[in-house]
Every structure is written in structure tokens, then in C-alpha cells.
Amino acid sequence: MLPRLGVLLSALVFLVSCTVPPDSPLFQSSDNLPPYNQDSFDQYVRDTRAWIADNRAFISDDRNLEIQLNMPFELRPDKPAKRGILFVHGLGSSPWYFMDIATAMANDGWLVRSILLPGHGTRPADLMLPDNEDWEKTIAHHANLLANEVDELWLGGFSTGGNLVTSHALRDENVAGLLLFSPGFYPNNDYLFLAPAISYLWDWVDIDDEDNIVTYQSLPTRGAALYYRSVSTVQKHLETARFDKPVLITMSQHDSVLDPNATLNAFQTRFPNQKSRFVWYGDTPQNLDDPRVTALASNLPDRRISTFSHMNVLFAPENAYYGEAGRYIMFENGQDGIPLPDDPETLWFGAWGQIAAEKYHARLTWNPYFLELLDNIREVTGDS
């Protein structure tokens, strides 16, 4: 959904009528949002699971799997943990996005939690319910809960979640470091600032078939406005403050949502810690002289990969849903009019909108360098 946001917002500027959703529970919001401020994380998980079960508009026959992949979770190591990390997902996605990384970090001795941002996990229309304060308070509450259980608190975020945890970390001295995956600091769209105003005129930016159990495919304008506010907030923080503690940032050169070069520049000027690392998937940036930046090739013809996408960094090739042989393939990837190949072995993978002659590109949803990413995390956090 998010890779289409820039194109869709640009198109909305010229629309004269609203997008009308089908008559489906998916496009009718729930009556309320779930509570987030329970006294324990266990109670939060139980309450949220029950809320999802009662409010989700299910799209498959496996309701238990849909609930499981959308609820918050905790992974504890075998021994009492001294360090903990709280993960926050992106717009339209789910806590499960961090399962592969969370599993590895729990095995390394971390107490890992991944929360559900209000408005997610049930139906796209529920993104009409929260405001940014709901998201900020949810993160603050669970950061405090985790800080009470460990000696060292880290935060991690993907895309919009990266914006939210960075803004929180710049206000919370308890945060010892950040892991940011495709953080959405700098969108590549000039019309995003219009999203809050557009949300009063049209309810939906995009309406799509909902066939992905871990990601909303459709986007209400309210969701786009929430993303814009997270961008505005984190940019204001980064203009006036630096984060002096360790941070890992990953970014694809071909990210269809963001401005990768602006993110790299922010890393070099606003994140000065010498333990910090920036992993750039693509061609080595010109005139790069920062030893903290690592460039990894994203054109891997032997694996039929042309470019890296906004989302693929998070997932191991073995992931059962998004992995190299996973059950879900994002065929719809901004290539209107190009027929699907008859032979799946000829399918190529890349960022949203990747087009090449005689090649059909699905979205890349796994990271060929996943083991290297885990090593990067260990290096930045001091586990190596």
C-alpha cells in the first residue's frame, strides 16, 4: 500500500469526485479502538487478541492465523534479559513484520516486544479512528513498561514506525539506541502535506483487493494524514536535535516511498555516534567518505532480483509468508498492462514500479542479506 502513496496523493490533487469503497466490512470502521495502557504486557496481548478476534474483517479461511500474524507479541530469552527492544511497525502493516529479527535477537538474549499501533490488525477502515496522539501514547506506555523490566532499552521501527520511535527517543533519555528499517523521515512526494486537508474531502486514497493477511492493501486518507504528521514531527526533531547514541539505519537506493539520499544525509549529520551504521542497498553513493556506511549490491541477477524494495529488509529468505518460497507473492507491483509470466521461474523481483523489458517484477519481500543484517544489529548493539 505505502509504495503507492506518492502517486495516489498526486492524482488526488486533480480529482473532482471521491473514491467510493465497496459495501464491505473492510471499509466500515469498528466502533472503537482497543485499549493499550494495561499494567502488564501479557494483559495487553490478551486484550488485543480478543479485540482483533471480535473486530477483524477476515479475508481467509484461517482465522487463527490472521489473528496470530496481527497481534502484538513478546519473545523472551532462556535467561533473564538485561536488554530489551520495543518494535513498532509501519503504516498498514503488523507487529509480525519483526518476527524474523525478533527471533534472532531473543536467541541473542534480548527481551523483545512488538506492539500493534491503534487502527491496525483488523480492517483498513480502522485507520480512520486513531490520531497521532494515540500512536505516541501507545509507544510511550510500552517503552516505559519495558524499561521497568530491563537495564537497557532500545527501540526499533519500520517506515512510519521508524519516525515514531525516533521522535520518542529524542525525548526519552532512557532509550539507549535505535534500529531503523526504511525509516520514513523524508518522503519523495511533494503533495504529502495536502493529506490532512484531503482527509476532510475524501475518505479513501486507495481501494484495492484485500488479499494480504499481514498488510492493508487499501488506504484511507486519514492514514495518509497520520503518516504526514509523523514525518512533520520527526523532521522538526531532527532539525533541532541530534541522537548521540548508537543507531542502525537501513535504506534501499530504489525505495519508491522515500528519498534515500536525504535519509543518508540525516544519518551523517544527526546521528554522530561512531558505533552507528547505515546499510545502503544499491550502488555505492558518490563521494561517500563515511566509514560507518556500508553499500551492498541490490542487483542480483542470479536470484532474479533487480532492486530492493521499501519492505524486504525485514524478512529472512526462509520466511514462510514473505520468503523466497513463501505462500504470498506481491504480483501487483505498479506494472499495469504487463502480463504475468506463465512460468513462475521467470518471475523477477524488485521495488514497487520496477519495469524492465521482457521481465515481470513482483515485489521483493525478503532480504538476501538477512544474516548480514543480523551481524549489523549485533555490531551496533555491542553483541558481536
Image (tube, helix red, strand yellow):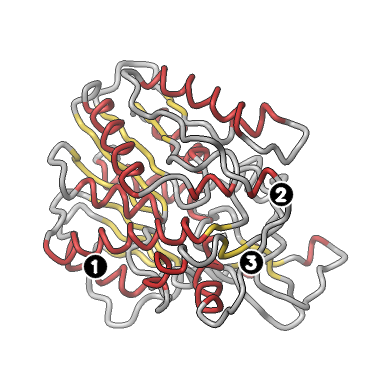
Helix, strand or loop at mark 2: loop
Circle 3 residues within 10 Å: few <14, some 14–19, many ≥20: some
Q: Earlier in the sequence, mark 3 or mark 1?
A: 3
Position of 267 with respect to 242 (left or right) is right
- The quadrant of the picture occupied by the C terminus is top left
Amino acid type assigned to the residue bearing label 3 in the image: Thr
- Residue 282, horizontal then vertical, whole percent: 46, 71
Q: Are marks 3 and 1 in contact (CB under 8 Å)?
A: no
Alpha-carbon span between mark 1 and mark 2: 36 Å
Comparing 201 with 331, the one in front is 201
Q: Which residue is mark 2?
A: 211
> Which residue does the image show at 33% across and 26% down from the upper left?
37
Position of 320 with respect to 3 (left or right) is right
Alpha-carbon span between mark 3 and mark 2: 20 Å
> Which residue does the image show at 37% across and 71% down from the upper left?
193
The label nearer to you, 3 versus 1, is 3
> Which residue does the image show at 81% across and 68% down from the upper left?
340
The label nearer to you, 1 versus 2, is 2
Q: Which residue is mark 1?
A: 266
**Above or below — where is 262 with respect to 74?**
below
Circle 2 residues within 10 Å: few <14, some 14–19, many ≥20: some
Amino acid type assigned to the residue bearing label 2 in the image: Asp
Given the current orientation, which residue lies at the most extreme right position? 342
The label nearer to you, 3 versus 2, is 3
Circle 1 residues within 10 Å: few <14, some 14–19, many ≥20: some
Alpha-carbon span between mark 3 and mark 1: 36 Å
The label number, if any, that marks residue 19 in the structure image: 3
